[in-house]
Amino acid sequence: LAAFLAEHEIRVREIYDPKEARSQSSLMNELSAYAKEAPLLSIYLHELKKLPERTEEEEGALFTALLAGDVKAKDPFIHSQLPMVCETALLYASQGSTLEDLIQEGNVGLMLGLAKALEDGEHWRKVLLSEVMEAIEQHIYAENAHETVGRKSVERAETLRDNVKQYKTEFGFAPDKH
């Protein structure tokens, strides 16, 4: 993971450890600072606050119920993992993407990771966190790659402009566009 992050110039403030996760109210306070300028994030956080805060034991019980085939446990389980997605997204908040986008991508990773976690069964927390981080990192990488292409296009246009100016200075006229 560290090599991937370094290779793609992705910096995180810290490594997320579910056992050291902040309380939901502390998390909401930090997220609220971002939500002031992002109305959709504000709505999302408002809805997230309505969800019950679950203990690790309750999350484990919900996951065990999922493993046993209890489809009614799926939504409560996923809802219990949304704060983890938000907290993970905060680690990447300085990478140029909006926090809304990072959370959205993390939620996609959570949904994709659930199938893998159910296959693994035993290390579901690590599997989910890994999938959430992977989804967020892929989004950041794609955003950075897109930005790089745009930056290179601008650099080429500026070089062309400079070359046209130099040509006009040397020859007294600009090259014909045709």
Image (spheres, rainbow, N blue to C red):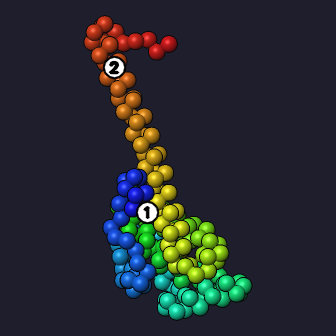
Tally the marks: 2
Q: Is residue 110 above or below residue 55?
A: above
In-image side of 44 versus 156 (left or right):
right
Residue 42 point in image, percent of width and height = 45, 73
In-image side of 144 versus 115 (left or right):
left
- Answer yes or no: is residue 126 visible: yes
**Quarter of the rendering containing residue 32:** bottom left
> Which of the marked residues, 1 or 2, is nearer the chain's N terminus?
1
> Which mark, residue 163?
2
Q: Single out the residue that lies furthest toward the top.
A: 171
Distance, label 1 to label 2, CA atoms, is 44 Å
Q: Is residue 103 above or below residue 173?
A: below
Dot 1 falls on a residue whose secondary structure is loop
Q: Which one is nearer the viewer's eye here, 89 or 47?
A: 89
Residue 68 point in image, percent of width and height = 70, 87
> Which residue is identified by label 1?
1
Query: Residue at 27% across / 12% down in the picture?
Result: 169
Residue 48 point in image, percent of width and height = 50, 80
Dot 2: few (<14), some (14–19), or many (≥20) neighbours within 10 Å? some
Q: Amino acid at mark 1?
A: Leu
Residue 152 point in image, percent of width and height = 40, 36
Residues at circles 1 and 2 in contact by the CB criterion of under 8 Å: no
Query: Residue at 55% across / 87% down in the picture?
Result: 59
